[in-house]
Structures are given as structure tokens and as C-alpha cells.
Image (cartoon, rainbow, N blue to C red):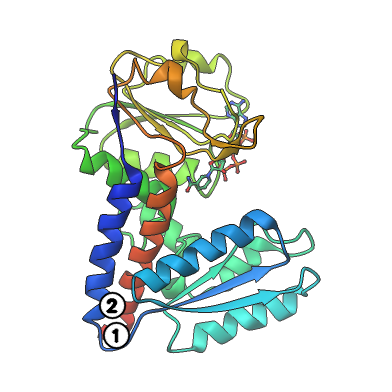
Amino acid sequence: MAVRIDGKALAAKVKARVAAEAAGLRRRPGLAVVLVGDDPASKVYVAGKERDCAECGIESFSHRLPAETSQADLLALVRRFNEDDRVDGILVQLPLPEHLNGEAVISTIAPDKDVDCFHPFNVGRMVIGDPVFLPCTPAGVMEMLDAYEIPLRGRRCVVLGRSNIVGKPMAALLTLRDGTVTVCHSRTEDMARYTREADILVSAVGRTGLITGGMVKEGAVVIDVAMNRDEHGRLCGDVDFAAVEPKASHITPVPGGVGPMTRAMLMRNILTAAKCHQAQ
Ligand code: NAP
């Protein structure tokens, strides 16, 4: 039976370290959070991030804007935060309402305050192996692999999904750590052929039951990034946990796996930004 990777416990440790370091700074680190519209899931995520900030001694400045906010007004707010010395990190909760251009918003965030690590400058720094920040979800996965002393060098890593937020940076980080990485996506033919070869399988697709027991190699490490809802409305991942757990060497549960680590990595990025700003 697989070792269950306890993201919740690990995240608590990371956040405790962030809180201890934040307490030693001259000024409390600050996060500006912008939520446009009233998407229920986004509201829950933002509330969680505000709670994490409070726990870590990070001040949060929240701005809730109506769904009909214009691009110009949103960019003006981001620019204001860029200039505000109390703000170390800026987070604009995605997805934005359809009339707003998310890429333009991300590119307007000052790179030294881009604690989500979505700005093209920071993505580039990450890919060349000289990061300022690491993208929160893939960084959380790497932290879990390291905490459970899972070797990566030369191992076959298969990442399912190629989004800018999860799949692509996940593949980049595994490559930088000498994994041999294959990325699958919606156009991949016979995906099971790849997943069955994986020593480390990271699924970030968003389809309940996508990964069955037959798609996983005996002894594989299985990381389930997805956050889906099953037919009863319960949170679940891509992996058929009951079928895969007996085969895997390590597995992340959903909930309690990657999710809490993503949030903890955000706190760590805010601390990194604050330390840089206070050293200037
Ligand atoms: P996304 O932007 O929708 O990307 C999904 C990816 O999956 C795409 O690359 C897509 O391929 C691929 N895909 C779709 N159907 C597929 C199939 N049948 N077989 C193989 N690949 C397929 O989603 P995302 O933002 O990366 O998020 C992915 C999942 O992770 C979601 O469940 C999301 O809720 C979750 N998530 C969790 C956390 C966390 O903290 N735990 C953080 C972020 C996201 P194409 O590129 O070809 O369309």
C-alpha cells in the first residue's frame, strides 16, 4: 500500500517557517489580493489565501471589484500596487470575467511582486534555472517529492496537462532536476502507454476518474494536482484513488495533498519578495 503524501502537514510546517521569518523582518510583508466579480470558487480561494496570510503574519490588502470593472481600471489598480511600498506581492485571482485580458493584467504586475510567478519574465527565469519565484502548484509538488526523499534524477516523469499554470512549469521543474519528462495533453494518442512507464506521474487535467489502476506502474509515485467535484459534489482528483493506492509507492490524496502546498508556496513567495524589498 502506498505512502500517503501528507500535503496538509507539510504545508503547516512551511507556513510555520514563513511566519517565523516574517516576524523577524523590519516590516510585515504585504499581499494585495484583487478579486473581480463573484465567482464562488474564486471567493473561497481568496478567503483561504487571506487566512493563510493572517496565520503567517502577512498583511493582506483585499480589493473586491464588480464583474463589470473595465480593463483600464483593473490595470490602474495593479499599477497602484506596483508603487505601494507596503505591498510585496500582487495576486489577481483568475479566471477573470471574459471581457478582461488576463495576460495583459499579469504582464502589468511588477515582476518583483509577481508572487504567483505568472509574469513572462519570471516564467523565463524559472525555465533557465535562475528563478526569483517558483510557480506555487509545481513548487508545492517539488517540495512534497523532496520531503519524501523521492529521487528524480534520470527517472521517467510523465506530466498530464500543459497549462501555463501547472503542466508546463511542472515539466520545466522536473527537467531542471534531471527527470526525463514526457508531457501528455488532450491530443495525446494512447495516453496509457506513457502513464504506464512513469516512475513519477503528475496529473493536472481536471477529469474525475481519468487515471485508473491499469494506467499506473507498480511502485510509481502518483501526484494528483486536480481539484474536481464528483457526482456527490465532493472534492476529488483525476486519480481513481482506491484503485491506484495499492499499486503506487507514494500517492497524494485529494483533498489534503497538492492544494495546501500550493497555498503554502504562495506564502513562501510573499516572504521571498518581502526579503528582497527590505534588502534594497
Ligand atoms: P487547464 O488549463 O484546463 O488545463 C488542463 C490540461 O489538461 C490541458 O493541457 C489539456 O490539454 C489537458 N487535458 C484535457 N483533457 C485531457 C485528456 N482527456 N487527456 C489528457 N490531457 C487532457 O487546467 P489547469 O489550470 O492546468 O488545472 C488542471 C487541474 O488542476 C484542474 O482540476 C484544476 O482545478 C487543478 N488545479 C489544482 C491546483 C491545486 O492547488 N491543487 C492548482 C491549479 C489547478 P490541451 O492543452 O490540449 O487542452
Residue at figure coordinates x 43%, y 87% from the top left = 86
Q: Quadrant of ligand 1?
A: top right
- Answer with the quarter of the image where residue 274 lies: bottom left
Marks counted in the figure total: 2
Q: Taking 253 as reference, is 67 above or below it?
A: below
Locate residue 160, reporting x and y percent: 50, 31
Q: Where the N terminus falls, by quadrant? A: top left
In which quarter of the view is residue 222 placed?
top left
Query: Quarter holding the C terminus?
Result: bottom left
* Numbered mark located on residue 167 in the image: none
Quick check: can you spot residue 94? no
Q: Which mark is residue 275?
A: 2
Where residue 42 appears, x then y in whole percent? Answer: 62, 58
Q: Where is residue 16 drawn, in percent x and y?
A: 26, 64
Badge 1 amino acid? Gln
Q: Secondary structure at mark 2?
A: helix
| Residue at which label 1 appears | 278
| Residue at the image position 62 percent from the left and 62 percent from the top | 43
Q: Residue at x 36, y 50 (%)?
A: 139
- What is the residue that sits farthest to the front in this orientation? 232
Q: Is residue 232 above or below residue 16?
A: above
Amino acid type at circle 2 is Lys
- Position of residue 233 in the picture relative to residue 61 (left or right): right
Contact (CB < 8 A) between labels 2 and 1?
A: yes
Whether residue 51 can be seen here: yes
CA gap between label 2 and label 1 equals 5 Å
Q: Nearer the viewer, residue 156 or 240?
A: 240
User: Is 113 or 253 nearer to us in this picture?
Assistant: 253
Q: Residue 159's quadrant in the figure?
A: top left
Across and down, in percent, residue 276 comes to 30, 78
For label 1, count other residues whose C-alpha is less than 10 Å away and answer few (under 14), some (14-19) or many (20+): few
Q: Residue furthest top?
A: 214
